[in-house]
Image (tube, rainbow, N blue to C red):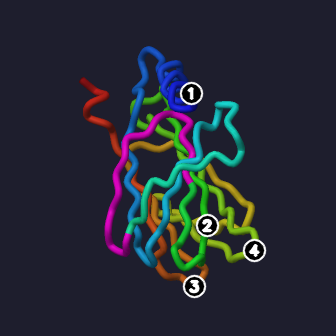
Amino acid sequence: VILCFFVLSISVLATEGKPETLKITFQASGPAIAVTFLGLQIANMDPDYEIPSGIVEPGERKTQRVHDGHVFKVRAADQSFAAKLTVGINGGSKDQPFSMHLKNIDFGGQPFELKHGEEFVWLEPGQEVGQLTGEHVFHITSAKHTPAFAIEYSHDEEDEL
């Protein structure tokens, strides 16, 4: 029943003129990271809903096709940081067809730094930042100024056919 609801929700999200999917690549730049799918932002889902997406070992990458409103938790295997990523599709722009919202959910922990373009933003526990983007790699650095992980947004070639 949950799977049917999930598939039905995805099909309802598709709108004419905007891509239905994009690709997100998670890369562990420091310690291994655990990536967990938390569901759809706009769906009325159980707040405890979590599906493990996988462990990404240092230096490795994990790419997956995602939809508008998908939410992920990224946590360091050594518990040194935790973040929540909300993925979006911005159908109104060819230059910035995606949106990215990143929140520091390590409430008992340290800030981390997001590098986007040539700008750097520190996110204290509980803080969130969002922006429109095109194909881009966002780098996250720990409070100790060491690389933590990266998130790459790219077009889904199958969606463009």
Residue type (three-letter) at the residue carrying disc 4: Gly
Q: CA distance from mark 2 to mark 3?
A: 15 Å
Q: Earlier in the sequence, mark 1 or mark 2?
A: 1
| Camera-side residue of 1 and 28 | 1
* Residue drawn at 56 percent across, 52 percent down: 85
Q: CA distance from mark 3 to mark 4?
A: 16 Å
Question: Mark 2 and 3 residues: CB-CB less than 8 Å, in contact?
Answer: no
Quadrant in the picture for residue 138: bottom left
Q: Earlier in the sequence, mark 2 or mark 3?
A: 2
Q: Determine whether 11 is above or below 45 in the image.
A: above
- In reply to whether residue 68 is colored magenta, the answer given is yes
* Residue drawn at 60 percent across, 61 percent down: 83
Measured from the top left, where is residue 101 in percent x and y? Answer: 59, 49
Q: Residue under label 3, please give it.
A: 144
Q: Residue under label 4, please give it.
A: 108
* Residue drawn at 61 percent across, 80 percent down: 143
